[in-house]
Image (cartoon, rainbow, N blue to C red):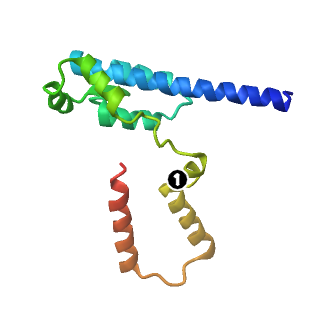
Amino acid sequence: MLSTKQINVKIAGIRKSTDAIRRNVHEVLCSIAGHALEHKDVSGFTRLIDATTGVNQKRIMAWVRANGLATWNKEKDCYQLNKSARDERINEYADGTEYSIHLFMNCDAWYVDADKPSQIDKELDALQRIKSLRSQVAKKGVVKVDFQALRAEMDGLMEDIQQYA
């Protein structure tokens, strides 16, 4: 077992490693976006996602969607060039290097405002909530139901959830 002092040294090393990983991933993201603009090549995003297990891939994918000129193809399990986004940017920048530098210097890094453990704990899992409600109804029964109001609330829930689909 490590002593408290040894634990603190390890934690400091992890903090430095985490900072380095974040900076490296951000640099790679910006460079791949430059390649997407100049060479229409987004394969680096797929390789990066494959290499970043244990890192917040949801944040990385959100950054790519916003800045990387690529979209995730669920069927092929890889990134594909977002041609319309590339077409919008192609006339704004001289080349991929200029776009990459722009992203690195002017855009928020992928990890900015990363979720804290307390925020992650509070994430809404709609499916789990629905299963829990069904379980409660099955166990306790329902005394009174206004089906019209229930339908209206369910329709509203579906509309709210679809924005995250």
Q: Residue furthest top?
A: 39
Horizontal arrangement in the rendering, residue 2 relative to residue 150 (left or right): right
Q: Is residue 114 above or below residue 14?
A: below
Q: Considering depth in this image, is 109 or 155 the residue closer to the camera?
A: 109
Q: Position of residue 154 (x, y in %)?
A: 38, 68
Q: Callout 1 environment at 10 Å: few (<14), some (14 to 19), or many (20+)? A: few
Q: Is residue 127 above or below residue 79?
A: below
Residue 152, by quadrant, is: bottom left
Q: Residue furthest left?
A: 91
Q: Is residue 137 above or below residue 126?
A: below
Q: Position of residue 27 (x, y in %)?
A: 41, 22
Residue at image coords 67%, 24%: 13
Residue at image coords 50%, 62%: 130
Horizontal arrangement in the rendering, residue 7 relative to residue 132 (left or right): right
Residue 51 visible in this rendered orientation of the protein: yes
Residue 46 visible in this rendered orientation of the protein: no
Element under disc 1: loop
Q: Considering depth in this image, is 55 or 97 the residue closer to the camera?
A: 97
Q: Considering depth in this image, is 13 or 132 the residue closer to the camera?
A: 13
Q: According to the image, label 1 marks what residue?
A: 123
Q: Considering depth in this image, is 84 or 97 the residue closer to the camera?
A: 97
Q: Amino acid at mark 1?
A: Glu
Residue 12, by quadrant, is: top right
